[in-house]
Image (tube, coloured by chain):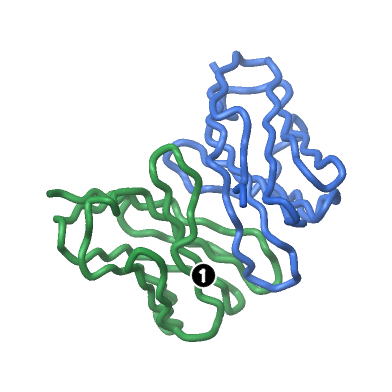
Chain colours: A green, B blue
Amino acid sequence: AQSVTQLGSHVSVSEGALVLLRCNYSSSVPPYLFWYVQYPNQGLQLLLKYTSAATLVKGINGFEAEFKKSETSFHLTKPSAHMSDAAEYFCAVTPNHFNKFYFGSGTKLNVKP
Amino acid sequence: EAGVTQFPSHSVIEKGQTVTLRCDPISGHDNLYWYRRVMGKEIKFLLHFVKESKQDESGMPNNRFLAERTGGTYSTLKVQPAELEDSGVYFCASSQGTGGLGETQYFGPGTRLLVL
């Protein structure tokens, strides 16, 4: 069975501070992992994805995530938060023999000036 | 290139009425998915089309939901009759369908459905 856990439904950071959004997954097979971002009144936009190549994945807008198999984690980080990063972030997993995504419950990121 | 579009953006209906949601995928994308997010919960898979065929409809809640994909292009999701628990945001996504596993899915902005 596949599932995704995102710790913290709301995360608040100051502008310029480190962003860390946590994602843990369970999967019966080696998974493909994704982070999506949703800005207000918009669709989900792909930030980055892991597809069994490099374990450290770089995405758009300065975000990156590291796949740690031993910890079943795929945490999203950004060294310095910007006001424009305020949005809701979703972690998703798909096992390698299906295409449907299993999503976490989302984390809303608030960036304080 | 146009992205995935969904219509309407919002819909407010009364319990027992019928609502039809429409999704236009990215041109040329064979795979089309429907997902739903009930308030505060995770986004959940409803079904998956490959061209005009239903590949996986394991996430459809019950037989009040009917999805179609005419000619392998746009898709509709009809809820008849609507119940209060059907309220939520319905997302459509599409992917190219070149056969690669873990393909990126491109999402539309969603339809916000409220059943009163």
Which subunit holds the residue at mark 1? A
Percent coordinates x, y for residue B107 in the rendering:
57, 50
Name the image quarter holding residue A41.
top left
Q: Nearer the viewer, residue B4 or A7?
A: B4
Percent coordinates x, y for residue A21 in the rendering:
31, 63
Name the image quarter holding residue B15.
top right
Q: Quadrant of the C terminus of chain B?
A: top right
- Which residue bears the numbered disc 1? A33
Dot 1: what SS? Answer: strand
Image side of residue A16 versus residue B22, left or right: left
| Amino acid type assigned to the residue bearing label 1 in the image | Leu
Mark 1 burial class by Cα count in 10 Å: few <14, some 14-19, many 20+ = many
Name the image quarter holding residue A13.
bottom left
Give the residue drawn at x 39%, y 78%: A66
Q: Is residue B52 above or below residue A56?
A: above
Give the residue drawn at x 35%, y 52%: A107
Image side of residue B32 versus residue B8, left or right: right
Give the residue drawn at x 47%, y 86%: A54
Percent coordinates x, y for residue A58 in the rendering:
40, 75
Q: Hey, which residue is sitting farthest front in the picture? A: B1
Percent coordinates x, y for residue A57 in the rendering:
43, 77
Q: Is residue A1 visible?
A: no
Q: How many marks?
A: 1
Q: Is residue A93 visible?
A: yes
Give the residue drawn at x 54%, y 26%: B10
